[in-house]
Amino acid sequence: LNFSKGQFRRTSSDDEVVRVIVRGIPGTPMPPSNFSESQASTIVAYLRSMTGATSACAGQGCAADAARGRAIFEGKGQCLTCHSVSGAGARTGPVLTEIGAFRRAVELERSIVDPESEIRPENRSVRVVPRDGAPMTGRLLNQDTFSLQIVDSSERLVSIDRSTVREVTVLKTSPMPSYRDKVSAQELADLVSYLASLRGKS
Amino acid sequence: MKSARRPGVLFVVFGLLVVPLVAGVSLGAQVSFDRLLRATAEPQNWLTHSGSMMSQRYSLLTQVTPDNVKNLELKWVFQAQSLEKFEATPLVVDGVMYTVQAPNDLVALDAATGRVFWVYSYSPSPQARPCCGRVNRGVAMLGNTLFMGTIDGHLLAIDARTGGLVWNVAVGGARPEAGYGFTLAPLVVKDKVIVGSVGGEFGIRGFLAALEVRTGKEVWRFNTIPGPGEPGHETWPGNAWEHGGASVWVTGSYDSDLNLTYWGIGNPGPDWNGDRRTGDNLFGESVVALDADTGALKWYFQFTPHDEFDYDSVQVPVLADIQFQGRARKAMLWANRNGYMYVLDRTNGQFLLGKPFVKVNWTSGLDAKGRPMNMLAPTPEGTLIYPGNQGGTNWYSPSFSPRTGLFYIPSWMDTYSTYIKRPTEYAEGQRFVGAAPIMPVRMLQGGPMINRRLPEEGYGAVQAFDPKSGERKWEFKMTDVTDSGILTTASDLLFSGGREGYFFALDARTGALLWRASVGGPVSAGPMSYAINGRQHIAIAAGSSLFVYALR
């Protein structure tokens, strides 16, 4: 199989490729693996990156433009209010500098239109109500039986002693708004194209 | 008592430690088998892997109490020159501690200060291929000789005074290239030292071997997979028995009245595809009771017939004399990786009680004889199974306190795996497993300790059960799972730790947290206690170091 062509013998969708990586192909030398689905997704993102194509626009006849996507990301979308790319932007939301190397286009698109469809453990928000003082919300970095570590809405690293708080809630909701009605189909494709192009510092 | 004449002995009187007449290290004292049998008569020492032949991991020392445990402080640290998991429980004999720096460096230290007397370094063959880390769980001692198994299948006898090699035996020819090796602490019974081999993921044929302590000559061997003509062979089709696994990698126990030694046996192989091994696959996933002199099988009890979930029954057999249904019983307590807690009669293997101690869905329940009913199986599409592949517990030493009457289990709560079945063929030295489960909560490996799981995605706990009823008395929850063993003491303290890097003390009666220390790395070993110079110490390995605490 020539990965650079972006065509797979047995599968077309990213989810199907993930399934092949995890489970192998019975009766062939392709063995099953011990990868989790999210790890396999990373591999698919890498495979897709070899072609330079994104699947957000595949088959839809639209021409996605990463440069236009960047303009939306930094302008109208106000994405840098929470996210950062190569050091620019805010750090309360996930860092997106290498997001294109780890996420498939279909996942990027889903996260933009439906941010709560999947919140990965590394992006979980937590709400802490101290015994004294105002409630705070931040991104959960680590936790144990006696403490938790967050980056708060002011981008500070805060370690919290559980004995000093009244309530800790890991939120099932995302602080990110849905962009479903905020961007056009073309703008969405451009955004995805831009995010898919982010593969680390150049 | 015989031990009363020996210098360096402490007595426990009304909960107080009486300082010995002669302080300091007494290297000349021989560790007779009689001392091993009566290990609880000298609680200042920790003479066997699990603290006694009963393997209760229970210390009679009472200087540290629920009232003063908050005053524990770090006395010394031994930093292993190894980044492997530090899984060894140390021995302490008359002021000298013996432990193992992974994979196979035996170290003698001053138990009061941690200063090193000597190091015996062994370089295992690069062919060694233990499945899950180049680890060692400890040593055994008899006379002035220490015994250490190596990951390449050798058993070494080392002079406790000098650190010099006495003998080095390649057990059964030692075939590390085929997956054989030792990670467990050996068990000395009378004049023999008993070991069992790892390799359940490499298609070995498992065994227990007893070697003569003076020479290393093999005296008996028990094949954990019966060969042609041996009882149980009929539970394997064709030649599946030749590569059926059934490894042994955790130390057994011994009942001197019955002259029986008990061992837990690992998974049949290939782990996750039982198609080529239809049948019960004895003695995989069983406890076997062997005549300690001959290795002859007295009885067995199989926890998980035809296992396809890697539920190794490789747990320390905890022996306890308890009242059960109004009658004194010589019992065996067993918290199995399959998620069930069992009480057996250790004279004959009779099933007395079995209850799940974590969420279980692989069976609909146990029948009157303790056999699981309606077992699920891996499928090509994947089968979601509770508990997950690492089990409801694993090799982590449990504890029984004769004072509280409770059985304490390091537990993985609500974990699951998706088991996917694939074909597999045997090739020497290659993994022989048949695909692999997808585990959201993974086995302990290197890397930073980050945990962002929700409780429903799995957590850890110390659980206390009444073995008479199977009733849970209390649970101490941790946000992350635990690979730590448990120690209880005669002052009703419980010591344990967890993957998130704490070592802590609980009230053994209530589970209330009384003290904790941040050890900065996951605990993957069992705690133990000893005394020197009139002071009780508690030792635990975590990360790649050994931490020793005493009252300030």
Image (cartoon, coloured by chain):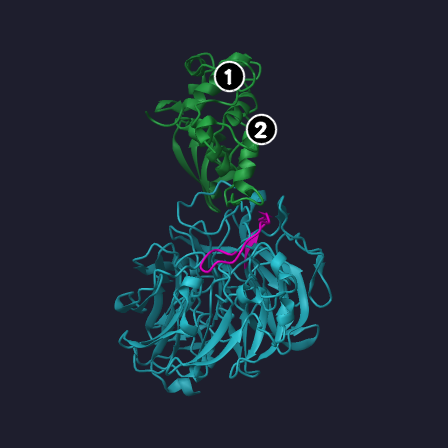
Q: Is residue B50 left or right of residue B308?
A: left
**What segment is highlighted magenta in the picture?**
B410-432
Residue occupied by mark 2: A117
| Mark 1 chain | A
Residue A186 to residue B476: above or below: above
Q: Which structural element holds mark 1?
A: helix
Residue B112 to residue A68: above or below: below
Chain painted in cyan in the figure: B
At label 1, which amino acid type do we have? Ala
Mark 2, residues whose alpha carbon is within 10 Å: few (<14), some, or many (≥20)? some
Chain painted in green in the figure: A
Quadrant in the picture for residue B93: bottom left
Residue B108 to residue B476: above or below: below
Q: Quadrant of the C terminus of chain B?
A: bottom left
Q: Residue furthest right?
A: B368
Residue occupied by mark 1: A189
